[in-house]
Image: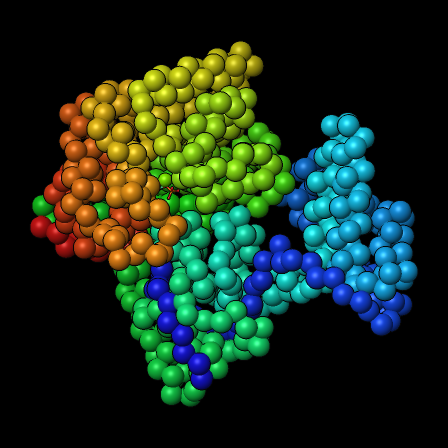
Amino acid sequence: MITCQGKSVFSGVAIGKIFVYKKAENTVEKYQIEDPAAEFERFKAAQAKAITQLQALYEKTCKDIGEEEAMIFEMHQQLLEDLDYVESIQGIIENDKLNAEYAVFVTAEQFAAMFIAMNDEYMSGRAVDVKDVSERVISILNGSQVSAEAMPEPVIILAEDLAPSETVQFEKDKLLAFVTQKGSANSHTAILARMMNLPSLVTTDIELNMEYHDKMAIVDGFTGKIYIEPDEVTMAEMKEKQKRAEERRRMLQTLKGLPTVTKSGKHVHLYANIGGVEDVDAVLENDCEGIGLFRSEFLYLGREDYPSEEEQFEAYKTVISRMAGKKVIIRTLDIGADKQADYFNIAKEENPALGFRAIRICLERVDMFKTQLRAIYRASAYGKASIMFPMIISVSEIIRIKEIVEEVKEELRQNDIPFGDVELGIMVETPAAVMISDQLAAEVEFFSIGTNDLTQYTLAIDRQNQALEPFYDAHHDAVLRMIQKTIENAHAHGAWCGICGELGADMELTRRFVQMGIDELSVSPPFTLELRKKIREID
Ligand code: PEP
Ligand code: MG
């Protein structure tokens, strides 16, 4: 048995096989081969597998989103079967006696360069496509690809690190836990793990050893340990621990349907944070009173182009309808920093967390912003929607946002498209917003404090950088005073105030937040019943 230690980002016990995930961008090796015919067959097998995957993606997208959006996968299949493309690969394998990965890589580069040289916008787009399908084939060839097919049963993912765009691509029901060598407890991948109810570890002192692949392991999210090939005693102990966690979960079920009020009668709205439509089941199972943060940017991650208005509308409408009249607060696109999508074409920045992100992108790319707002407003006709805007630092931003919102509403009216009464709020997650929270509160109906970013900007500690752990104090008085000031200013100007950062689920602070007068706490769904219990015990 091998035991490794990490930092737990979510408790619970997971037992299952390890899946070693290596990033697709692994450098492509170049080596001589002995048997060109066998090597070409290896390519043909990977090509066939990629085509099957693309066909499955085509069918899934057709069903979930629409035929138009699915066309890209059909086109990718055609590219892979293109005779010139295949002949070029065959030539490199047979004439130069080089390996298939390298032959695919070189061919993709040559084709992309040829498409770009045509100086035509459409053909430049094909350059991206040929590289993309080729990467798929390369990752099948070098075994680094993660697909539902590659994960026949739920697994413990072992990786160096995971970006949010990678994490969203895993099928949720194929996951038991995440264990990473790097990462930080405040990263979006850690947040996703919590939302998905997965015991997970970061900064784990574990090797990324292919020999661990398929080995039995146990992740103990209570102590931050992973046991590889556990002995019988450990297995029995962990099964017992898992049973106790399950009993606690069952006990908490008795709190379903009860109000979240303190003994002295103060009601705190208990809402949930979600990243997509698939999280609504957990929201309903845990009896959350609403959704306090829908991180809409996850709809934009792990894909090759912007989600269309229709696609976004369907997602928002599904969430709003399923919440059946309960509040759903949709945060507009908060892309940037660790949440990156190549197709945004954002120039590389020295300090992306302090860079061109979130509302700044939306206010510069108004058409894209309007597409999202139109989708949300259209969906608002199906229930109770609110919108909040991330990374606000000034009143002028809100004034500009409201102008854009009015334009969107006017366009909808002109086209007789119905929409609901939508409450507007902002995230308070910059020290600037805290300091002018009196002025900002006069402009909006609510505040939601994003303690993840507010802590990073207040303490000048990069939330992604685990090396700064010794300096990090989640309960720093500066942050707590900022929260206090924000709540006071909100109330003084008729706005309500909640917390949607991870600190909202920190039960050592619940009493303090209630004393400060917090109106709402929005947390990952698995925390809600535990938090309700805590609030009901406060007198
Ligand atoms: C926050 O910053 O606290 C927040 C809730 O937003 P995110 O974690 O997505 O940046
Ligand atoms: Mg934030």
Q: Residue at x 53, y 11 (%)?
A: 414
The vertical placement of 152 against 268, above or below, is below
The vertical placement of 174 against 112, above or below, is below
Report the number of numbered marks: 0
Q: Quadrant of ligand 1?
A: top left
The vertical placement of 444 against 281, above or below, is above
The quadrant in which residue 214 appears is: bottom right
The quadrant in which residue 120 appears is: top right
Answer yes or no: is residue 271 visible. Answer: no
Q: Residue at x 89, y 68 (%)?
A: 37
Q: Position of residue 53 (x, y in %)?
A: 71, 55
Q: Position of residue 208 (x, y in %)?
A: 52, 69
Q: Residue at x 31, y 60 (%)?
A: 253
440 or 85, which lies in front?
85
The vertical placement of 231 against 329, above or below, is below
Quadrant (top left, top right, bottom left, bottom right) of the N terminus: bottom left
171 or 105, which lies in front?
105
Q: Residue at x 73, y 42 (%)?
A: 129
Q: Position of residue 424 (x, y in %)?
A: 35, 25
| Horizontal relation, residue 495 to residue 343: left or right | left
Answer yes or no: is residue 300 visible. Answer: yes
